[in-house]
Image (tube, rainbow, N blue to C red):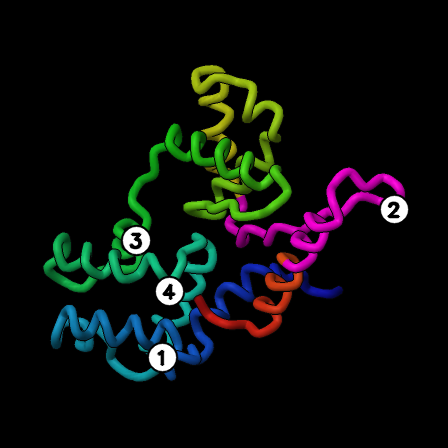
Amino acid sequence: MTKMTNAPLMESRSAWLEIHPRLGMSLMDHLWNRLDGAYPNRWRAAFANHQAVENWREAWAEAFAEDGIRPEEIRPAIAACRRVYDWPPSLAEFLKVCRPQADPRIEWAEAIESMRVRLRGIGGDEWSRPQVYWAAVAIGWHDLNSQSWESIKARWINALAHARSDPVPPYMVALPAPGQQSISAEDARKRIAHLAEMLASKMTGEAP
């Protein structure tokens, strides 16, 4: 029997463990160094041997992938750790400062606006975390856009709680079928160029 794997999750996890072209080391190794600098002696002393460091790298990279943590969230999280924790943070503590408790109503408003941008057909939608996107997908655009906060509150909170943490899929240009074109040739060229840029970026595998 073939074992099923979550390809997007594995890809996101690998991004934290592979060598970053600009850093010359993995993002996890860079984070280890940053925490070692923030907590001189205390951070390093928590690791008995090289295997303990490897276990830390694997566990934290997996958690970052599952929670959809982005590299740009790490710097402010380290700064928050210095303010909040006298001793080096555990994984759970680090995730709390990396992704403070979100306000579901703010994320509901984000979902409406970001999905509206996405449905314009030109891309450019932004999401604070993958779960907001997947919760919006689970509810559907019609209900998301037509119901008030009070009427959709319980459903939205439940959707967030059970939302997938897979990365938000890139916007894919949907061109009309031959003979049914409703956009100009110039717009079509722009959409194709936009798709080509995204595909090229994905193929190069450049880290953010």
**Residue type at mark 1?**
Leu
How busy is the neighbourhood of tag 3: few (under 14 within 10 Å), some, or many (20 plus)?
many
Name the side, left or right, on which 199 lies relative to 59: right
User: Which numbered disc flags the more N-terminal residue, 3 or 2?
Assistant: 3
Residue receiving disc 3: 98
Residue receiving disc 1: 23
Residue receiving disc 4: 60
User: Which numbered disc flags the more N-terminal residue, 3 or 1?
Assistant: 1
Give the residue at x 37% y 77%: 54
Distance from Cα at disc 1 to Cα at disc 2: 47 Å
User: Which numbered disc flags the more N-terminal residue, 2 or 4?
Assistant: 4
Give the residue at x 81% y 41%: 181
Distance from Cα at disc 3 to Cα at disc 1: 21 Å
Residue receiving disc 2: 178
Secondary structure under badge 3?
Answer: helix
User: Which numbered disc flags the more N-terminal residue, 3 or 4?
Assistant: 4
Q: Which tag is nearer the camera, tag 3 or tag 1?
A: 1
Residue 14's spot in the image, x, y percent?
50, 70
Look at the image and tell me in which quarter the N terminus lies. Answer: bottom right
Q: Which residues are magenta?
A: 164-193
With respect to residue 145, does 179 lie above or below?
A: below
Give the residue at x 51% y 33%: 159
How busy is the neighbourhood of tag 4: few (under 14 within 10 Å), some, or many (20 plus)?
many
**Residue type at mark 4?**
Trp
**Residue type at mark 3?**
Cys
Q: Which tag is nearer the camera, tag 4 or tag 1?
A: 1
Q: What is the number of callouts on the image?
A: 4
Distance from Cα at disc 2 to Cα at disc 4: 48 Å
Give the residue at x 30% y 61%: 74
Distance from Cα at disc 3 to Cα at disc 2: 47 Å
Distance from Cα at disc 4 to Cα at disc 1: 19 Å
